[in-house]
Image: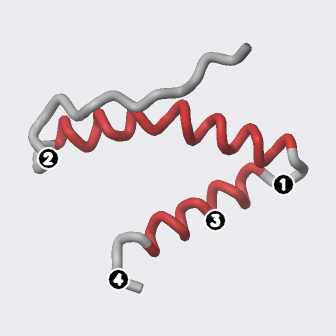
Amino acid sequence: MAKALTIGAPQHPAMSAAYEQHCREMLVPHLDALLDKVEAAGWDRGQAASALMYLAARRLTPA
């Protein structure tokens, strides 16, 4: 059985560069797993990554 992915709690103040870097490190295995699933379903990995960037950017501004 595959190991469940988890996300650890922040270890740095929210406004520090270390906070953002740690957040990225926590997200990498989840993003890789999602892109693996998307690719396995037949989608182009690069196009899926582009779509994720778009969707993430949309969350930075109010709808």
Which quarter of the figure has residue 1?
A: top right
> Residue 28 in the image: x percent, y percent?
49, 35
- The amino acid sitting under disc 3 is Ala
User: Between marks 3 and 2, how big is the CA–CA gap?
Assistant: 26 Å
Direction bottom: furthest residue: 63
Q: Identify the residue at image location x=55%, y=37%.
A: 30
Q: Residue at x 53, y 62 (%)?
A: 53
**Residue indicated by mark 2:** 14
Q: Which residue is mark 4?
A: 62
Cα distance in 3D space between marks 4 and 2: 21 Å
Q: Which residue is mark 1?
A: 43
Give me the C-alpha separation between circle 1 and circle 2.
Answer: 35 Å
Q: Residues within 10 Å of mark 1 (few under 14, many from 20)?
A: few
Identified by mark 2, the residue type is Ala
Characterize the local packing of mark 2: few (<14), some (14-19) or many (20 or more) Cα atoms within 10 angstroms: few
Instruction: Indicate the secondary structure of the residue bearing disc 3.
Output: helix
The reply to whether the C-beta atoms of the residues labelled 4 and 2 are less than 8 Å apart is no
Task: Give the residue number, with chain letter if any, for mark 3.
Answer: 51
Circle 4: residue type: Pro
Count of marks overlaid on the render: 4
List x then y, in percent, for residue 17.
17, 42
